[in-house]
Amino acid sequence: MKQQFYYWDTLNFIWQPFVQAPYQQFRDWAVRIIHYTPTVVDGLLMYDTLYYDIDTLDEAIYYRSVRLSSIDTVTQWFRSLYSIERFYSIKRILKIKQTMNGHNFMEYTIDSIWQGFYRTIVYDYNYDSLNRLFYVENRGGLTNPSGGYEEFVYDSIGFMNYHHANDWTMVRNADYYEYYSYFDTAAVKIIKPMWDERPMVCPNSSYQPTLLVAGGCGPYQYHWYPSDGLSSDTVLNPTITVTDSMNYTVIVNDNAGHSDTILYSIGPIYSVALSVDTSNYNGPAILTAIEYPFADYQWYNNGV
């Protein structure tokens, strides 16, 4: 059985017939949408082109755009920004995305050929048994090696609570982190951001937490135990003067009788100090270091 294929003409606002053929023999696309945007390039009226090809049988989507930037009217060479994206899906779940983009040139002849593509960028999408996206990896796209990845972590009830993205090239490596918190609007909750899990500050200096309160019914009442080093023990984020490591209990009560409690810890960062005692010539040298949280030691012999 043959089917008639059409594309949407955005200049004339009508569907234009393209070809009539059996669907199994015409595998490129089932529906094509073409969008033309008039533009003036080097004094000539041209049309930037955007293609959407949708294959409903294979559940693949093909996207292509051409934006003209200059024309050499003598040699009939066109310069444009050309990009292609193809999406592959399995059971309506996106698995792979491939892209090509860059500044390209085309000689305007009967059999025109585009030249100068950048390398293809390939995205691999990984899903868990519940069809939740948990890892994405990409590679390619530049003349030198490059790539990146993304991680998604979910809590016990299915909400995403952590997202980490990495982007690398031969000369740089960048990481981005996002943390999410969820709460029941009917109950009050104190939210402690990840960066405030255990802040470390210089001795005898001040620090102000960044706690948040959500849900419940205001106004809220706050209380910190103990009150040592606090500018106030009845506000959400008091100024803390740090002289020693402290563990505080923070309580919030709302106007409807709901409450929530968290533990908040803070401590000073001591200056690094390392001494060596070699007075005992018949025994090993004694190393003494000021201990502080998260200390890291490395040994070297002749710089190695």
Image (cartoon, rainbow, N blue to C red):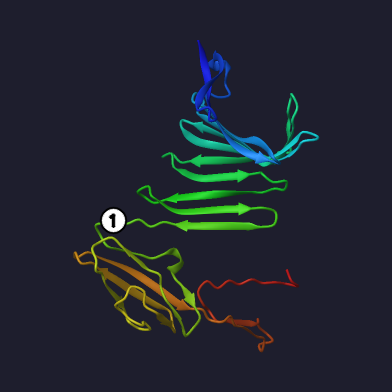
| Direction from residue 281 to residue 12 in the image, left or right | left
Judged from this view, the residue extending furthest toward the bottom is 279
298 shown above or below 240:
above
| Whole-percent x, y for residue 61 in the image | 53, 31
31 shown above or below 205:
above
255 shown above or below 51:
below
Q: Residue at x 47, y 85 (%)?
A: 204
The image quadrant of residue 287 is bottom right
| Whole-percent x, y for residue 197 in the image | 43, 68
| Direction from residue 189 to residue 152 in the image, left or right | right
Q: Amino acid at mark 1?
A: Asp
| Direction from residue 58 to residue 110 in the image, left or right | right
| Whole-percent x, y for residue 207 in the image | 44, 78
Q: Residues within 10 Å of mark 1 (few under 14, many from 20)?
A: few
Count how many numbered circles sit on residues in the image.
Answer: 1
Residue 82, visible in the rendered structure: no
Judged from this view, the residue extending furthest toward the right is 75
Judged from this view, the residue extending furthest toward the front is 43
Q: Residue at x 70, y 54 (%)?
A: 170
Please state, as top left, top right, bottom left or bottom right, where the C terminus lies in the image: bottom right
The image quadrant of residue 67 is top right
Q: Residue at x 37, y 72 (%)?
A: 264
268 shown above or below 46:
below
Residue under circle 1? 184
Residue 207, visible in the rendered structure: yes
Judged from this view, the residue extending furthest toward the top is 1
The image quadrant of residue 267 is bottom left
Element on which disc 1 rests: loop
| Whole-percent x, y for residue 176 in the image | 54, 57
